[in-house]
Amino acid sequence: AQKITQTQPGMFVQEKEAVTLDCTYDTSDPSYGLFWYKQPSSGEMIFLIYQGSYDQQNATEGRYSLNFQKARKSANLVISASQLGDSAMYFCAMREAYNNDMRFGAGTRLTVKP
Amino acid sequence: EAGVAQSPRYKIIEKRQSVAFWCNPISGHATLYWYQQILGQGPKLLIQFQNNGVVDDSQLPKDRFSAERLKGVDSTLKIQPAKLEDSAVYLCASSSTRTGMGQETQYFGPGTRLLVL
């Protein structure tokens, strides 16, 4: 059974600094996708970045990058140059190929300090 | 491009009452999902539609929850009768045709916050 673990309930970062949000996963399927979503207090889940299990390079989207270490089954999100608007809950999720269920971690609450 | 629309945004009901939520996915997205997100947790899939057919409803409490997507576009999720533990945010998401590689990005609506008293 697939499982997503986010070990950091809360994180603080100073504005303009970089921060890493941890995510580890467990699957026996060789083909899967990893996702990060941001959920501000308004409640909407905002897609940030995707990494496929067969992708050779780490995914990047603007200030977001995914540190994908397949052997360690980790998919950490790196946010560079943090902004006050980055304060939100961040969820890591995984979906196996041909599996209907996208499983989410418990989330990490990021607070950016001015 | 318009995003996923949901209504209502908030709903307060008493236990044993019924409630319905509506979702309109992104235009052209064949797959639609309903998630339940209890406070402090990540979303949990309730049901997935591919066009107007149910692909997965294994985690839907079928004794009280029902969902439909009659014309393959809009969808309605109903709870009848509601229990206290149904208090949560109900999120609707949609994605384009599945490729079978687990890579389909799901786009979420703003959610409906339900409080059962």
Image (cartoon, rainbow, N blue to C red):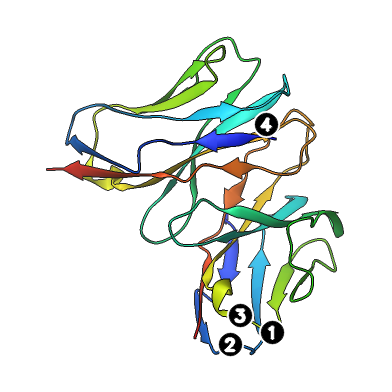
Find out whether the residues at labels 1 and 3 contact each other: C-beta distance under 8 Å. Answer: yes
Find out whether the residues at labels 2 and 3 contact each other: C-beta distance under 8 Å. Answer: yes
Q: Secondary structure at mark 4?
A: loop
Mark drawn on residue A111: none
Q: CA distance from mark 1 to mark 3?
A: 7 Å
Q: Position of residue B97 (x, y in %)?
A: 78, 41
Judge whether A9 appears above or below A43 on screen: above
Which residue position holds label 1?
B81
Q: Position of residue A68 (x, y in %)?
A: 50, 18
Do circles 2 and 3 both sit on a common chain? yes
Which residue position holds label 4?
B103
Numbered disc 4: what chain?
B
Numbered disc 2: what chain?
B
Say which label, 3 or 4, has the lower sequence index. Answer: 3
Say which label, 2 or 1, has the lower sequence index. Answer: 2
Residue shown at 43% from the left, 25% from the top: A76
Residue shown at 58% from the left, 9% from the top: A56
Mark 4 nearby-residue class (10 Å; few <14, some 14–19, many ≥20): many
Q: CA distance from mark 3 to mark 4?
A: 35 Å
Find out whether the residues at labels 2 and 1 contact each other: C-beta distance under 8 Å. Answer: yes
Mark 1 nearby-residue class (10 Å; few <14, some 14–19, many ≥20): some
Q: Which one is in front in this view, the residue at disc 3 or the one at disc 4?
A: 3
Mark 3 nearby-residue class (10 Å; few <14, some 14–19, many ≥20): some
Judge whether B117 appears above or below A23 on screen: below
Q: Secondary structure at mark 1?
A: loop
Which residue position holds label 2?
B15
Which picture quadrant has residue B93? bottom right
Q: CA distance from mark 2 to mark 1?
A: 7 Å
